[in-house]
């Protein structure tokens, strides 16, 4: 069991970083960019994503240590490597995985060519895990408390959340005027599994005592909420596969969410965008199980009573800090994401042979900066990106990014989107410098997809 | 144009490398934590040995000690050190005996102390390893017995001082 848990924790660490999609954000030739800003300046007559192939992204991140640090086949004893990792990380180091798979997506333009409003919709499935390093628990497991007389162990170090859910969304964006595009996206979440233990507190210490040799106290306020598991832990006789499919389509624990976004052009060659993603919650009411470990206990050891005799202390600890298993419904908030960018464009990309009058300027190059902030149980996760975007050919667009965040300070990313005929293919990858040895990477992300796009026309057919 | 795209994809797929990793190392995981904690404590006042004006020659208590019911803990335990420290500020000598009993109340092991009158800083360390540890692991109850051998001055309800015992356990675990 313990080993399984370890394998799980570390396999989680191989797969992931947070949900920053710095290459995809505002990469307007890819319709999936609307998922990071519903007010993205994307124009189409209609588009449809190739089912299951239109969008796949995986982000993995681990601040503080890499897979190599733990699993390098270098002759160093695994326990030594584990110690080095534990003692070189802090309680604020984290392991994060985010994976999204679009099951279906599409969109169309409303009204005739003079109208400028667009609908987009789809279903995607998302896996989201964020675990802080439970440093003080790891120290206790590795060393015990013998060499830590006087240290206060922080039980709040246990801080983790994980979820598998499906998301149904319907978005609308409109060119309110020539300079401003507003967008909104409504979401229904159907949570398949959830584990959430993010508000723990408590402490434990051992100090020299007066009456007894030690003064030993544990004060615990730990709560682990789970939903979606009980069917499998309690004498399950059904079919897990069909259960998950059922839960994907509204059969799970349900929630509601909202995305808001805008794109604004103060000048033709200057663009500002901003979005708030996943303003939403999930109510966990089905298959809920909570584990609570709450109470205060001062451990004095055996205290024989020679007068009264026959004192019985065996139950004291369990009575003081009982491990309770409950079924109380709970609510989780989705991690809220904020994106913003500012972009300057230059270089007239119009074909010199065309008669350009009345034809809108199409810039060839853009440079810009982006900010990403995501809420976490502790300090928000922040990333800053500088980028260069270029229309290489009519059918090929490129975006190169340089990102600084808590996982890496030299994250170079590259995205390419090609549209041949009606078929759009895109591939985006970041942390390219780390691909020379992925096992040493602290974060990696990868996205690709395939769409069919009928472009918008601003003239009547 | 498509060459560019092809080169990009190829470079990601083929130029990416990984150092030699061995995930089976997790099977070598071996945790060896050492915990310290209080074992037993008492502080008996001199006048508590007197009931109805009569000295009690023997006092005792019998306590459940069920930590070894947890087989996971018992299997992981490789060594236990018990450290005792006694301070006697009563002007009489005592004999203290700690007896470990199994689930059938049969005595397994005992730790005796001779405590002279007005003696402080009496210490003793018992190290449980190997077969001695196996004996300890069968413990289900601990008996504490204090004997007051005949002597003077007689204890009365106004006698001063106390017989104090503090003890700690150092627990060595190996988890793999």
Image (cartoon, helix red, strand yellow):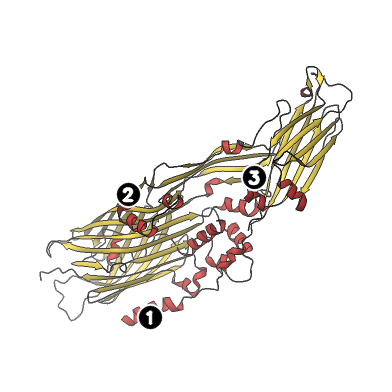
Residue extending farthest to the left is A460
Q: Which residue is mark 1?
A: B7
Q: Please tell me the numbered disc located at residue A255.
A: 2
Residue extending farthest to the front is B104
Q: Residue A99 placed where, x, y %?
A: 39, 62
In the image, residue A351 sits, relative to residue A86, either above or below, namely below
**Is residue B85 found left or right of A88 in the rendered image?**
right
Quarter-wise, where is residue A41 in the image?
bottom left
Q: Secondary structure at mark 1?
A: helix
Q: Secondary structure at mark 2?
A: strand
Report the chain holding disc 1. B
Q: Which residue sits at x=53%, y=66%? A: A67
Report the chain holding disc 2. A
Tally of numbered tags = 3
Q: Nearer the viewer, residue A55 or A275?
A: A55
Q: Please tell me the numbered disc located at residue B69.
A: 3
Q: Which residue sits at x=70%, y=35%? A: B63
């Amino acid at each position: 069991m313990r080993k399984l848990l370890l394998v799980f924790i570390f396999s989680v660490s191989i797969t992931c970083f947070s949900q920053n999609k710095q290459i995809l954000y505002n990469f307007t030739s890819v319709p999936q960019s609307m998922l990071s800003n519903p007010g993205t300046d994307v124009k189409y007559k209609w588009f449809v994503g190739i089912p299951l192939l239109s969008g796949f992204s995986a982000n993995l991140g681990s601040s503080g240590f890499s897979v190599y640090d733990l699993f390098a086949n270098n002759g160093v004893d695994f326990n030594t490597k584990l110690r080095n990792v534990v003692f070189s990380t802090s309680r604020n180091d984290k392991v994060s995985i985010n994976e999204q798979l679009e099951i279906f997506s599409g969109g169309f333009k409303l009204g005739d060519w003079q109208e400028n409003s667009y609908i987009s919709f789809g279903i995607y499935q998302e896996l989201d895990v964020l675990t802080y390093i439970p440093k003080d628990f790891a120290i206790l497991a590795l060393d015990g408390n013998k060499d830590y007389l006087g240290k206060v162990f922080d039980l709040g170090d246990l801080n983790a959340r994980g979820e598998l859910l499906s998301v149904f969304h319907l978005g609308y964006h409109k060119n309110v005027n020539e300079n401003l595009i507003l967008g909104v996206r409504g979401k229904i979440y159907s949570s398949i599994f959830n584990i959430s233990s993010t508000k723990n507190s408590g402490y434990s210490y051992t100090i020299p005592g007066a009456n007894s040799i030690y003064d030993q106290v544990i004060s615990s306020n730990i709560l682990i909420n789970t939903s979606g598991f009980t069917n499998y832990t309690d004498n399950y006789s059904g079919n897990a596969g069909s259960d998950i499919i059922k839960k994907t389509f509204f059969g799970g624990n349900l929630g509601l969410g909202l995305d808001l976004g805008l794109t604004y052009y103060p000048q033709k060659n200057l663009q500002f965008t901003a979005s708030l993603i996943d303003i939403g919650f999930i109510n966990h009411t089905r298959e809920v199980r909570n584990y609570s470990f709450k109470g205060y206990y001062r451990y004095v050891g055996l205290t024989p009573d020679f007068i009264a005799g026959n004192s019985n202390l065996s139950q004291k600890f369990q009575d003081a800090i009982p491990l309770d298993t409950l079924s109380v419904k709970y609510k989780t908030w989705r991690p809220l994401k904020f994106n913003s960018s500012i972009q300057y464009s230059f270089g007239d990309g119009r074909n010199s042979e065309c008669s350009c009058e009345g034809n809108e300027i199409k810039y060839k190059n853009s440079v810009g900066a982006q900010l990403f902030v995501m809420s976490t149980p502790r300090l928000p996760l922040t990333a800053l990106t500088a980028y260069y975007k270029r229309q290489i050919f009519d059918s090929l667009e490129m975006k190169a990014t340089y990102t600084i965040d808590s996982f890496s300070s030299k994250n170079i990313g590259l995205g390419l989107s090609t549209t041949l005929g009606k078929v759009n293919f895109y591939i985006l990858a970041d942390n390219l410098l780390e691909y020379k040895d992925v096992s040493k990477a602290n974060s990696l992300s990868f996205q690709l997809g395939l769409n069919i796009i009928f472009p918008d026309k601003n003239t009547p057919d | 144009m498509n060459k560019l795209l092809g080169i990009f994809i190829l470079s990601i797929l083929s130029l990416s490398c990984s150092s030699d990793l061995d995930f089976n190392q997790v099977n070598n995981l071996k945790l060896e934590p050492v915990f310290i904690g209080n074992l037993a404590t008492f502080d008996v006042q001199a006048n508590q040995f007197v009931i109805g004006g009569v000295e009690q020659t023997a006092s005792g208590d019998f306590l459940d000690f069920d930590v070894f019911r947890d087989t996971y803990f018992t299997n992981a335990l490789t060594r236990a050190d018990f450290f005792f420290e006694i301070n006697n500020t009563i002007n009489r000598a005592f004999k203290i005996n700690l007896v470990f009993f199994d689930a059938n109340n049969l005595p397994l092991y005992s730790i005796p102390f001779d405590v002279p009158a007005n003696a402080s800083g009496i210490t003793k360390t018992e190290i449980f390893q190997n077969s001695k540890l196996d004996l300890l692991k069968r413990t289900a109850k601990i008996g504490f017995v204090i004997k007051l051998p005949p002597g003077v001055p007689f204890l009365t309800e106004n006698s001063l001082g106390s017989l104090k015992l503090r003890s700690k356990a150092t627990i060595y675990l190996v988890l793999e």
